[in-house]
Image (cartoon, rainbow, N blue to C red):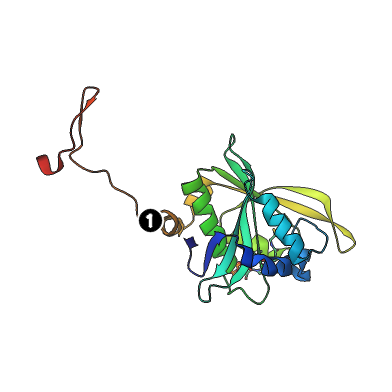
Amino acid sequence: MLTGRLVELRPVRADDLDFLAALANCTPVRTHVVGWGWPISAEGQREWLQRSIGDPHLHRLTVTDQATGEPIGLTGLWELDWHNQSALTAAKLMPGLAPKGAGSDAIKLLMAWAFYEVGLRRLHSTILDFNGASLGAYVRRCGFRVEGRERASVFRRGEWRDLIRVAALRSDFDALPDADEYVERVCGPRPVPVSGVERVGSEPVAYAPNGH
Ligand SMILES: CC(C)(COP(=O)(O)OP(=O)(O)OC[C@H]1O[C@@H](n2cnc3c(N)ncnc32)[C@H](O)[C@@H]1OP(=O)(O)O)[C@@H](O)C(=O)NCCC(=O)NCCS
């Protein structure tokens, strides 16, 4: 469980499936996310969850409202590339359920987790050219940088739309004014080395706290 200021991120559970089907079918969300899919039933959503369990290349997390504990969205890591220590990330929140700022809170939590717990060095995503909230959250508030533009790449509402490619390195996250807070939220306080543990040559000596 990852606890932010407004939201929590936790593994997807079977009792989230009705909500996740509603989120996947919600028209404003479908309009704004990059991927496209057929309308889905709760049953289809169950098969989707089963298929993804055990896949080492993805890890989905349910976003919940800290105040109510209820699911409000989905985020996670996709296309995990262990060799290059990178992954695709994305987020979607149900309109009307998420408190203002929930998206940025979820994104910073996920960045802290990916960079300081999972061990990644780069997160990337794509954003449709008309998605002001997503650009506001990822780029303006969470340190992602625009790396390119795919022209007329995605078919949406009968038109071909440009896709903005964005990414954040760990150093981009570290430059956020509240990076330390989010690392502490995910990993706890920074552990300090125990004093009194010395090595002589290559031989470890006994742990001797306070010189005893
Ligand atoms: C993208 C998403 C996760 C962002 O979450 P959020 O809670 O709206 O994000 P935040 O409020 O933390 O940050 C968004 C920022 O962009 C601003 N913003 C919102 N709509 C905007 C618009 N049309 N144009 C410019 N800025 C906009 C917000 O005011 C906010 O900035 P502020 O905090 O300085 O006021 C959420 O809007 C969402 O789920 N949208 C539908 C699905 C989606 O688009 N997913 C992303 C696919 S790439």
Look at 68% across and 56% down and name the residue there.
49
The residue singled out by tag 1 in the image is 188
Residue at the extreme top: 201
Q: Is residue 47 left or right of residue 197?
A: right
Q: Report if the beta carbon of the residue with label 1 is closer than 8 angstroms to ligand 1.
A: no
Pick whichever, 187 or 172, lies toward us. 187
Pick the residue in front: 6 or 206.
206
- Quarter holding residue 196: top left
- Within 10 Å of disc 1 (Cα), the crowding (few <14, some 14-19, many 20+) is few
Q: State the residue in front, 91 or 175.
A: 91
Question: Ligand 1 is in which quadrant of the figure?
Answer: bottom right
User: Is residue 90 among the parts visible in the rendering?
Assistant: yes
Task: Identify the element where label 1 is drawn.
Answer: loop
| Image position, residue 198 (x, y; %) | 20, 33
Residue at the spot 51% in from the left edge and 58% down from the top edge: 109
Image side of residue 190 versus residue 97, left or right: left
Horizontal side of 161 relative to 74 (left or right) equals: right
Q: Amino acid at mark 1?
A: Gly
Q: Residue 68 appears at what percent x and percent y?
A: 53, 76
Quadrant where the C terminus is found in the figure? top left
